[in-house]
Amino acid sequence: MKALPFPCIRPAQDRVLEALPAMGSILSGNDALRGAIADGLMLKDPGAAYYVYECSGEPGRVTGVVAICPTSVLAGGKGVASADVAAAAHAIAELKVQPRPVSLAYEASPVMDIILGAAKEGASLYAVTDPAGITHRAWEVKREDAVGAIRAMLDQAPEPVLADDPAYAGALVGVSQLLADEARSAGTYTGKEPFNFTVAALFPAAQVSGGAPQVPTGLLTHQVARF
């Protein structure tokens, strides 16, 4: 599986409790998002990183890796076509940011559990509890050796499968197609653009057999077009 570190757009660490309840407004359009970045409420990470995400509450605890994967991993979303999906794709394309990671399940090795456990020994970026009593934690992994270890494990893993709403996956496929068509029309398409990748929360299949959790909207986002 190809799953890479990425530069994230996310809430400022000391303002996350202010930002998350306001995400509906912050992500209402690109102008609003840029305003939140200018205000310091949201920030653009200067470099690429993986993120370890943990969700705990009923019925237990799940740990995943947030990374960008080629949009082709969402093949299951290609068959989803509706006016709502098309509208969602256009909205994300205009926002220029994927608002939350799509949840995917993959076959994780025991070694990956050890690597992620080591990452979680450090201080977390976020630890927030939502109204449903679910606690969401995230750790940034950008040290070269740790990034290399995670990437090596993901490189060896088979392709993940969708563990999210097919309509959301379909919208993300639509975003990629819309922006690729625009780039081709402009004669600038290279295949390496960020819209060719989707940010995904990769969860061990054994932990999410009953359904994968969703990373809160706005917590870890991926810029798909320049602004």
Image (cartoon, helix red, strand yellow):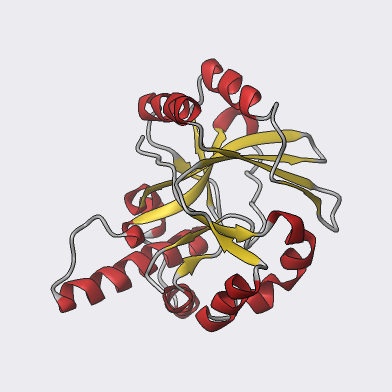
Of residues 86 and 114, the one drawn nearer to the viewer in this rendering: 114
Q: Is residue 28 left or right of residue 122?
A: left
Of residues 150 and 146, the one drawn nearer to the viewer in this rendering: 146
Q: Position of residue 5 (x, y in %)?
A: 44, 42
Q: Position of residue 198 (x, y in %)?
A: 42, 54
Residue 76 versus residue 187 in the image, above or below: above
Residue depicted at x 49% and y 48% = 200
Residue depicted at x 37% and y 24% = 156
Q: Residue furthest left?
A: 187
Of residues 125 and 216, the one drawn nearer to the viewer in this rendering: 125
Of residues 63 and 43, the one drawn nearer to the viewer in this rendering: 43
- The answer to which quarter of the image holds residue 99 is bottom right
Q: Is residue 149 left or right of residue 57?
A: left
Q: Position of residue 96 (x, y in %)?
A: 44, 72
Residue 40 versus residue 34 in the image, above or below: above
- The answer to which quarter of the image holds residue 77 is bottom left
Q: How many marks?
A: 0
Q: Position of residue 81 (x, y in %)?
A: 40, 70
Quadrant where the N terminus is found in the figure: top left
Residue 143 versus residue 35 in the image, above or below: above
Quadrant where the C terminus is found in the figure: bottom left
